[in-house]
């Protein structure tokens, strides 16, 4: 049997996917004047947490849970594949940055914080590229200058979402890791 995908890891991967999906409902959607909409959401916490707890394979839970949410909402269904990639990168990057330390022993707050920051940065680079190319140019049919001018309207929600994820995910990861360890459960990180 492949050690990366033992039953415990698969169960935890499924649980994190479900948590990412459910956390996407904690959202306030705000229309913006040019280029569509933006949201305040708590889902980024769980996306980063997936990577911190599961390693790079946590990106699968981040992407899949978010894409499944998109499929349940007509506003987002057409872009579920983009969400799968962008949110998946958030968990993947966070997981890559903690993988070595997690394999050698316990996670540290500093490493989790670096993973959360880098995961959020990677996501927001992709999110703003998607907002410009996909939302602005392709879907809305905006001129490049107008699509570019619409991006600053998404900054407040993006800063809020990233800040909340960066603040909340590292202590949650450490607390959950300690609880798993006390209960005799360990996760194999890919």
Image (cartoon, rainbow, N blue to C red):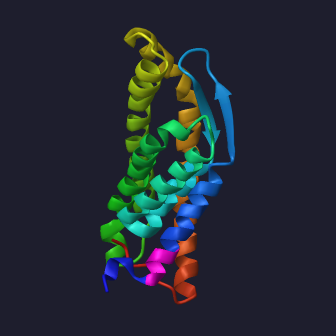
Q: x, y (%) of residue 75? A: 61, 34
Residue 109 visible in image: no
Residue at 55% x, 40% y: name it. 77
Closest to the observer, 114 or 34: 34
In the depicted structure, whether residue 2 falls above or below residue 39:
below
Q: Please tell me in which quadrant of the rendered image residue 51 appears.
A: bottom left
In the depicted structure, whether residue 6 falls above or below residue 54:
below
Q: Quadrant of the C terminus?
A: bottom left
In the depicted structure, whether residue 174 falls above or below residue 164:
below
Residue at 48% x, 69% y: name it. 13
In the depicted structure, whether residue 112 falls above or below residue 131:
below
Q: Please tell me in which quadrant of the rendered image residue 91 appears.
A: bottom left
Residue at 45% x, 83% y: name it. 7
Give the side of residue 162 with respect to residue 111, left or right.
Answer: right
Q: x, y (%) of residue 171? A: 56, 63
State which region is magenta.
7-11
Q: x, y (%) of residue 172? A: 57, 64
Residue at 30% x, 82% y: name it. 2
Q: Quadrant of the N terminus?
A: bottom left
Q: Please tell me in which quadrant of the rendered image residue 111 appears.
A: bottom left
């Amino acid at each position: 049997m492949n050690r990366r995908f033992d039953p415990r890891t698969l169960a935890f991967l499924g649980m994190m996917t479900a948590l990412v999906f459910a956390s996407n409902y904690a959202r306030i959607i705000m229309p913006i004047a040019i280029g569509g909409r933006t949201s305040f959401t708590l889902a980024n916490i769980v996306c980063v947490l997936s990577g911190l707890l599961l390693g790079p394979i946590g990106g699968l839970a981040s992407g899949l849970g978010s894409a499944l949410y998109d499929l349940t909402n007509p506003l987002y269904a057409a872009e579920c594949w983009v969400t799968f990639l962008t949110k998946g990168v958030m968990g993947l990057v966070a997981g890559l940055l903690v993988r070595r330390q997690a394999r050698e022993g316990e996670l540290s707050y500093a490493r989790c914080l670096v993973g959360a920051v880098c995961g959020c940065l990677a996501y927001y680079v992709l999110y703003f590229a998607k907002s410009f190319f996909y939302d602005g140019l392709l879907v809305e049919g905006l001129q490049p200058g107008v699509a570019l001018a619409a991006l600053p309207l998404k900054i407040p929600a993006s800063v809020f979402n990233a800040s909340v994820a960066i603040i909340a995910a590292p202590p949650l990861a450490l607390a959950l890791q300690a609880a798993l360890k006390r209960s005799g459960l360990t996760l194999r990180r890919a």
